[in-house]
Image (spheres, grey):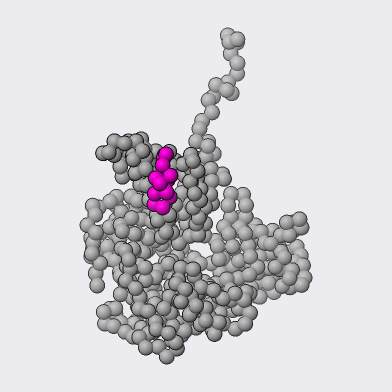
């Protein structure tokens, strides 16, 4: 099944850029099937094995078939000379972008850390990870668990819970959690849960299955991709995760007993597999891959979610006479995601500025053209256009923390509600946790959003060395010697 081309004009050609950072070898996720083990073409057919079998002996309730995607939504993965870039495209519009070695987050990395100085007042300790910055580990958990205090120089098994920001080092956790295709395993917790994106009946079914599979004292959360999953598929996922966990623990014991720490024990360095595992599900109409990652990704989907196999397609740039990213104007849309000013379709603009504490988004109607000619109407229309674009920009730029939007003033309460609901709708597809507060009488809206990675602008830029990011040049007259003729 071929997808239809969207017939857009060719964008700026995607050139191969030399960038720092190279994706390292296959990470923790193993490829389970040799490439020749599955049919050479999905059309040849196969029995779905892992998920949603047609007749399952383990299923106690009817299992839904994969639902047809509601809109054109694609995950594009392109690999070139060991570097991977990936984009999520919705209805032709770029909404998320990732690049190996650049947008990578350290969240989920596991280390054999070395305990540094203690901060008794804060009940936490610095932990040397062998990286640029030391991490911060809160201690109460450690103390309760082991009954003994950590001492300077001790080894400690930690996982990054939050990336470092500015001068602050990464936040660490002493409780590990590991993500699989269908669940997040939390071996030190007792909690069983399911993604809030699933409907109530499915959540209850998955919670029941997890309770059956997991021994007491282990916790897990079923992920969105687990919708309709058989017990067998969940069990396989659980076994994979346990294997990875034992592997990490063994590595830690070796590092601790030999004194070879700090050391990195696990990182999700395989961007292509990680994205396939974490985000590709039945809401996507296609997963298109250009480059050598294709076989690995197809193997993974064949193993884990065979019902989605016919949505995985190889893109051959020679055959298509076009680069995959060029076809979807990725580079062009990406450069818009780095600009301070974003043009709206009818002449209005967004101006996006990041400060230490928050991101400010200013909505301007400057040249906004509206046929009605009424001021109020123009403001509302421009604000609604802005709201839609803000939802996309927050996702594309992966802006985190507090965001303040300064909309154009509107007199009518009903107009403010229209704009707020447009904003809510625009942010609905955002898989990151977010909240929108109401609008003040001056047209300010506060949004909070949790970052997924490092942020697009942060990843693809560095601070100006001339003004250290302030964006101004102080007049040299201030530093001049007072002239003898003056005064
Ligand atoms: Zn500057």
- One can see residue 337 in this view: no
Does the magenta run of residues contain 416?
yes
Q: Position of residue 39 (x, y in %)?
A: 30, 82
Q: How many marks?
A: 0
Point 65% across, 57% down: residue = 134
Q: Quadrant of the C terminus?
A: top right
Point 52% across, 39% down: residue = 469
Does the magenta run of residues contain 30?
no
- One can see residue 311 in this view: yes
- Give the quarter of the image for residue 48: bottom left
- Give the quarter of the image for residue 426: bottom left
Q: Position of residue 30 (x, y in %)?
A: 47, 76
Q: Position of residue 223 (x, y in %)?
A: 48, 72
Point 34% across, 82% down: residue = 38
Image height of 317 relative to 339, above or below: below
Residue bounds of the magenta highlight: 410-422
Q: Position of residue 100 (x, y in %)?
A: 45, 60
Of residues 215 and 263, the one nearer the viewer is: 215
Of residues 203 and 455, the one nearer the viewer is: 203
């Amino acid at each position: 099944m071929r997808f239809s081309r969207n017939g857009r004009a060719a964008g700026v050609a995607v050139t191969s850029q030399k960038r720092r950072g190279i994706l390292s070898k296959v990470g923790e996720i193993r490829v389970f099937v040799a490439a020749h083990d599955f049919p050479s073409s999905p059309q040849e057919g196969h029995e779905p094995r892992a998920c949603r079998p047609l007749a399952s002996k383990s299923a106690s309730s009817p299992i839904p078939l994969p639902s047809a995607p509601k809109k054109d939504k694609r995950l594009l993965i392109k690999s070139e000379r060991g570097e991977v870039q990936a984009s999520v495209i919705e209805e032709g519009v770029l909404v998320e972008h990732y690049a190996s070695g650049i947008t990578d987050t350290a969240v989920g990395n596991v280390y054999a850390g070395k305990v540094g100085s203690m901060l008794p007042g804060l009940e936490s300790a610095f932990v040397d990870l062998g990286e640029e910055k030391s991490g911060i580990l809160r201690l109460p958990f450690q103390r309760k668990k082991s009954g003994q205090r950590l001492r300077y120089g001790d080894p400690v098994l930690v996982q990054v819970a939050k990336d470092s920001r500015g001068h602050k080092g990464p936040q660490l956790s002493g409780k590990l959690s590991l993500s699989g295709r269908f669940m997040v395993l939390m071996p030190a917790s007792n909690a069983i849960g399911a993604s809030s994106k699933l409907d109530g009946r499915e959540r209850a079914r998955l919670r029941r299955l997890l309770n059956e599979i997991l021994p007491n004292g282990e916790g897990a959360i079923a992920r969105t991709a687990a919708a309709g999953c058989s017990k067998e598929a969940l069990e396989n996922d659980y076994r994979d995760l346990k294997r990875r966990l034992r592997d990490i623990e063994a590595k830690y014991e070796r590092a601790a007993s030999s004194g070879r720490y700090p050391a990195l024990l696990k990182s999700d360095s395989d961007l292509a597999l990680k994205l396939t595992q974490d985000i590709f599900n039945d809401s996507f109409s296609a997963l298109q891959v250009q480059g050598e990652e294709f076989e690995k990704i197809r193997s993974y989907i064949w193993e884990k979610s065979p019902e989605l196999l016919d949505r995985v397609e190889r893109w051959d740039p020679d055959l298509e006479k076009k680069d995959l990213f060029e076809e979807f104007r990725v580079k062009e849309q990406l450069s818009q995601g780095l600009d301070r000013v974003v043009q709206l379709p009818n002449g209005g603009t967004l101006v996006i500025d990041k400060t230490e504490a928050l991101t400010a988004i200013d909505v301007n109607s400057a040249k906004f053209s509206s046929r009605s000619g009424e001021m109020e109407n123009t403001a509302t229309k421009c604000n609604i256009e802005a709201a839609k674009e803000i939802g996309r920009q927050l996702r594309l730029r992966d802006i985190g923390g507090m965001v303040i939007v300064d909309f154009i003033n509107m007199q009518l309460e009903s107009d403010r509600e229209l704009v707020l609901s447009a904003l809510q709708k625009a942010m609905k597809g955002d898989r990151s946790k977010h909240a929108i507060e109401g609008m003040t009488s001056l047209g300010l809206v506060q949004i909070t959003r949790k970052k997924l990675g490092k942020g697009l602008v942060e990843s693809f830029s560095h601070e100006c060395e001339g003004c250290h990011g302030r964006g101004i040049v102080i007049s040299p007259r201030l530093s001049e010697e007072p002239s003898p003729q003056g005064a």
